[in-house]
Amino acid sequence: MATVRTYGEHCAVARALDVVGERWALLVVRELLLGPKRFTDLRAGLPNAKPSVLSQRLRELEAAGVVRRRTLAPPSGARVYELTDDGKDLEPTVIALGHWGGRVPTRPGAVHGSDSIVLALKSRFNPDAARGLDGSYELRLATDRYRIEISDGQLTARRGEVEAPDAVIETDAGTLGAVLLDGRQLDGALDSGAIRLEGDRERAARFLALYR
């Protein structure tokens, strides 16, 4: 078993929580759903997790077959963590928890994380409202880059740049979270320059308007 503590039950829910029920474990999975990350990137995405605790969770998840380590090809050569196929199968669970968690009041001082915002775009996507928006979008949240593709009524999102996007949306996680989740007016954010659009501005604005 990946964790030291166990519920000691045959129940499948209990056995799943033996693996991903420790503090920070499922958030590590969330941080890797959009692609591999270095340890420093995981720390940036989970700033309230102590490095020692984060290292322990990664060891446990690796032992459970949820996470693996890999060395990127040259010239990078960086060591990264990524989800295994079993780890990727947790995406619906993470998305469902996000939907349920939307009912829970936000605590004072809570911040929006870049990956969590992009996963919210994915989970709240309405294919009927997005008819005519097929194409590629690059979302720039501070130094983070995301590739968003809409095709055949589906939205896919991964970490990374787009070679020739139809539109670019540039802002920060706090602003985008405020617009999409907290009721800030999109028009006001655009007028103030807090959200900047490039390429097909009309298409990008309509994409953001899906989530108002």
Image (spheres, rainbow, N blue to C red):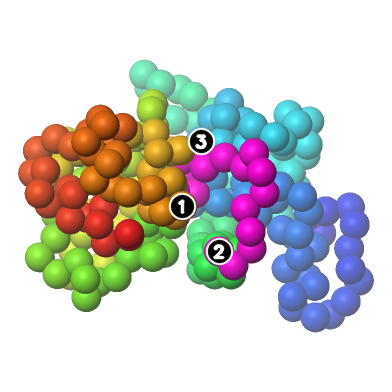
Q: Position of residue 12 (x, y in %)?
A: 74, 78
Q: Relative to residue 176, is residue 170 depicted above or below?
A: above
For the residue pair 188 and 172, the one nearer the viewer reads as 188
Residue 110 lies within the magenta run: yes
Q: Which residue is mark 3?
A: 37
- Numbered circle sitting on residue 182: 1
Amino acid type, mark 3: Lys
**Cα separation between marks 3 and 1:** 28 Å
Quadrant holding the C terminus: bottom left
Q: Main secondary structure of the magenta part?
A: loop
Q: Which residue is mark 2?
A: 102
Residue most extreme to the top: 75
Segment colored magenta: 102-118
Residue at point 14%, 69% (across, down): 131
**Cα separation between marks 3 and 2:** 26 Å
Q: Earlier in the sequence, mark 3 or mark 1?
A: 3
Q: Earlier in the sequence, mark 2 or mark 1?
A: 2
Image position of 35 (left or right of 45): left
**Cα separation between marks 2 and 1:** 11 Å
SS at badge 1: loop
Residue at point 25%, 30% (across, down): 193
Image position of 52 (left or right of 193): right
SS at badge 3: loop
- How many numbered circles does the render carry? 3
Tag 3: Cα neighbours inside 10 Å, few (<14), some, or many (≥20)? many
Amino acid type, mark 2: Gly
Tag 1: Cα neighbours inside 10 Å, few (<14), some, or many (≥20)? few
Amino acid type, mark 1: Asp
Q: Position of residue 70 (x, y in %)?
A: 53, 36
Residue 61 seen in the current view: no
